[in-house]
Image (spheres, rainbow, N blue to C red):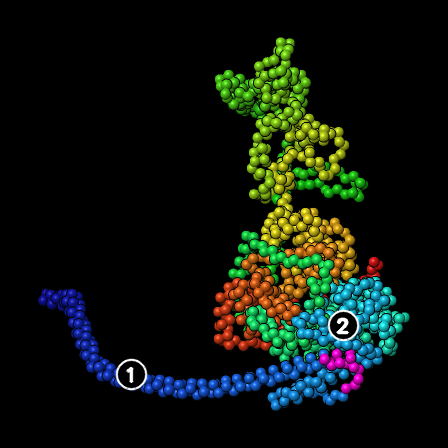
Amino acid sequence: KAYNNVYDSIWKDMARKDAPKVSRIMSSSLNIKQLNAKKTAQLASKEARRWQIRANRSVKEVQVKARRGMKEMMTYWKRNEKSERDKRKKAERESIDRAKKEEEEREARRQARKLNFLISQTELYSHFIGNKIQNNGATDIGEKAAVGDVDFDNTDDNDLEELARKNAQSAVKAAQDRAKQFSENKDTGDVDMSDGELNFQNPTTLGEIEIKQPKMLRCQLKEYQIKGLNWLVNLYEQGINGILADEMGLGKTVQSMSVMAYLAETHNIWGPFLVIAPASTLHNWQQEISRFIPDFRVLPYWGNTKDRKILRKFWDRKRLTYDKNSDFHVLVTSYQLVVADAQYFQRVKWQYMILDEAQAIKSSSSARWKSLLGFHCRNRLLLTGTPIQNSMQELWALLHFIMPTLFDSHDEFSDWFSRDIESHAQSNTQLNEQQLRRLHMILKPFMLRRVKKNVQSELGDKIEIDVYCNLTHRQRAMYDLLKRQVSVVDLLRKAVSGGDDGSQTLMNLVMQFRKVCNHPDLFERSDTKSPLSLAGFAETGSFLRENNLLIVPYSATNLIKLQLPRLFYTDGGKLDIPSNNNPRAGFEKKYTQNLMSIWASDNLHESRKSNIDGNMSFLGLIGYSEAEISATALGNISIPEQLKNIIKDVGKMDLYSRGNIVYDEDSESTPVPVSRMLQIVPANSTKVLASTTHEGVLDDMCNVWRSSLHDQDKLHRLEPMGDPRATAPPIAIECHSSVAAREYSDMLFNQSFRESLFKDLRPWTPKELVENKVERMYWPIPGEILPQPTSERAGYSPIRVPSMAKFVAESGKLSRLDQLLVELKQNDHRVLIYFQMTKMMDMMEEYLTYRQYRYVRLDGSSKLGDRRDLVHAWQTQPELFVFLLSTRAGGLGINLTAADTVIFYDSDWNPTIDSQAMDRAHRLGQTKQVTVYRLLVKGTIEERMRDRAKQKMHVQEVVMEGKTNTDETNGAAKGDDVGTESAFLESSSFQKPGRDVAFWLLDDDAQAEAMLKDTKLNGTPDRKVGKRKRENIEAELENMYHEGEGFFESEQQSEVATPVPYSA
């Protein structure tokens, strides 16, 4: 048993202790064996893969080499094929270019022969007119050949000349036939053929027969006007339409009236005559016809729809002839109304149609041009001082209007003349002299033009001066900010490609730049600033309740009220009154008013005794003891009785002046104290002080602060550096006591208290203003009773109104204009100032009011009757100094010869509009020299617009006067600018407003040239813009800075009522 127990315990110990150890050893051994086996397998696998990688690498290298060889082979063959294809395309392109060049040369020869054919036809037309005047015999002519049916390639020159002769004869016969439908009267005469001079003073249709001035015309025509009458009569007799293009101010109106008078007096043709003019000149036409031809009856056709319907009852459509007793002979209307009522005008056969300011029909695509072209008229006469405003297209529109059969193709006219002439004006290229002469030969039969310097010797000279201004700091900052906000180059690319959005954006951008140049306040005006008033006021008085006298008492009170008990106020309102409830009363009395007060009598005595040069040493010079000074200083200054006592002391004291002390011979009779000898002022009376210290050295001594602040530093003339954000009257004390109310009123309005405080009154101040002898004081308060303000700019009120001096200084143009007007006013000149923006005119009115210049204003919003009265007032009232006008509304058909100076505050993009405006003063009746000032801002869009305007003016000079020397015209313009713009415009249309606007905005010419070169290389197509969209673009350019002008280019109907006849 014991053995078994030992045996069992041994097995238990082995199971408990040795078995887990052996298990762990076996498990560890197994793990080590597995790990070694795994490592051995990995090494074997790695070694096996090494041989496999070596085998795969050799296979991949073979594949890569194969692909590389194939790629190189493909590249070689592609290059070979491309080279062969390029050679083939080059050969084809060279073949096409040769064919195109041959076709262009053939077309150029054809066009040259066609141009020669049409020019010869026009020259023969003029020649046959002369022969017709000399010989009225019939001529047998063949059928007219259409230009499109002629084979210019194969037809012989002799055959072309014969065809031109037949076509010219056909045109003459057609004109004669149309004239016969209206009248059978014929006169004969000789024609003075022109010698080829490059002007239009001697048209080929001007006969040699001298026609005398009609007796019906109640004025004396000048020699050149009688010559114009001869030309118009010859045109009428031959049934030819014409353009009277005399320079503005030479009497085109009276010449056209004279031909109507001639027809009535000589041929008994009394109408009907149709006169179409801008709305601003309708009254002028009506008055001048009634004044100079009283035998004519004028029908003014304008007003609303109902008024015009009544006026149409005068038209007798059944009557073919008119006599002296007809209801009307001349109908005067506007372009807007004649288009609106075109259906009624087309029913009448008009004997003569006169279009005043005919540049209104310069667009051949407008409804106005097409509508007027369809009217039944024997003759048409166009009156315009500027037949060419922007391009040759406008000239063609007028020529086609008067002679549709001869000038039927605008494209050919543009190819022959417009391109070369406009390119010459822009880039100073060589102009074909022979071509220019032939153009003048074409125009001479239909146009008569004289300029003032050639026909009117008594008319004064006209001097044009460009006045350049600089941008102010505020303007420069705004200008640079606008340039940084928009990429002009991107917009220019859009404009080059013909995009409508880009053009409209450019126009708006130009408008913003021009606003900055004119005045920065056009964007935002300075507002009146005032602090917040924390106060209460009484109810506003009413004259209905107070009759004729309205009393406005002092009623401003603070919103904060201090409620003071009546018992507290009756005890003096002080905490130093001894009482059982005030234990500090003795302390306050002893320390604050005695021991610690510099005004205590003991402290004053000790100060004078211990230190002769101390702060209180001046007390010996004022004549008061320490006790009197202490009582005055520590007493209540609001009590009037103390002030009265001080004033009464003046009468009790002997007044001694320095003169008595120094020069009195009887010095022993009256003892003089030493303190009185050293007095600066004889007494303490404020009246004596006022009468003594406001002159000489004492004035400077007693008013040192005023001298340093006002006279030396001039600080009172500066604008205040800061303004209060809020204001409030003093906090008022409210106490239910009549004593408190009376004392508070005495403190504000007491007579003695007021006399004591008014120490700045001068000796010449009226005494009744200080004393209470004036019963009532009406507004405004006399300035003598008010104290002098610290700042002359700020005044008494904290309300800050925008400074007009700052308003003038913030604009470079306005500052220069301010200086210019002062000089003109001193020399008794009278000035016309033209504007493009009505908002700028509003601001100019404020400036003229500030400078106290008398002026009148006329813009697009002025009614017809008001315009007549304004012009009459300007011509008859010499005290008026300035006439403000908008260029579009005030530049046509009005006579302003009372002015001898014209100022363009901002110029129009169309130079002809400015020329018409300045000729309102430089016209017949002007005996003085007219000076024209044009304000321009350096380095801005205005300077570039001026250069473009000079180029457009040169186009007119080339066509109308034959000038080919561009040195004078383009001398002021920069050479790089002209070269860049001409290079651009040679490849584009001269009439695209978006492109013109883009070049106004560009300042860097090198950048422009690079962009144009890039555009040319890339071959950017010029996208065609629809007709409607193009008209919208041109309309935007016309209207982009004319707010509410209402000028004659508008298609809208006039909304004015029938004007009252004006009696001269």
**Magenta-colored span:** 127-139
**Residue at image location 62% in from the left, 47% down from the top:** 805
Q: Quadrant of the N terminus?
A: bottom left
Mainly helix, strand or loop, the magenta region?
helix
User: Closer to us: mark 2 or mark 1?
Assistant: 2
Q: In the rendered view, would you say 435 is above or below 450?
A: below
**Picture coordinates of residue 1029 (x, y %)?**
63, 73
Kindly identify which residue carries mark 2: 231
Residue found at the very far top of the displayed protein: 668
Query: Is residue 166 part of the magenta span, yes or no?
Result: no
The picture quadrant where one finds residue 209 is bottom right
Residue found at the very far bottom of the displayed protein: 154
- Of labels 2 and 1, earlier in sequence is 1
Residue type (three-letter) at the residue carrying disc 2: Trp
**Picture coordinates of residue 1053 (x, y %)?**
75, 68
**Residue at image location 61% in from the left, 57% down from the top:** 466
Q: In the rendered view, would you say 919 is above or below 609?
A: below
Q: Nearer the viewer, residue 499 or 544?
A: 499
Secondary structure category for the residue under label 1: helix
Left or right placement of residue 1011 versus residue 959 in this view? left
Residues at marks 2 and 1 touching, judged by CB atoms closer than 8 Å: no
Q: Quadrant of the C terminus?
A: bottom right
Q: Residues within 10 Å of mark 1 (few under 14, many from 20)?
A: few
Kindly identify which residue carries mark 1: 64
**Residue at image location 23% in from the left, 81% down from the top:** 53
Residue type (three-letter) at the residue carrying disc 1: Val
**Residue at image location 54% in from the left, 63% down from the top:** 974
Q: Nearer the viewer, residue 361 or 820?
A: 820
Q: Nearer the viewer, residue 716 or 834?
A: 834
Q: Residues within 10 Å of mark 2 (few under 14, many from 20)?
A: many
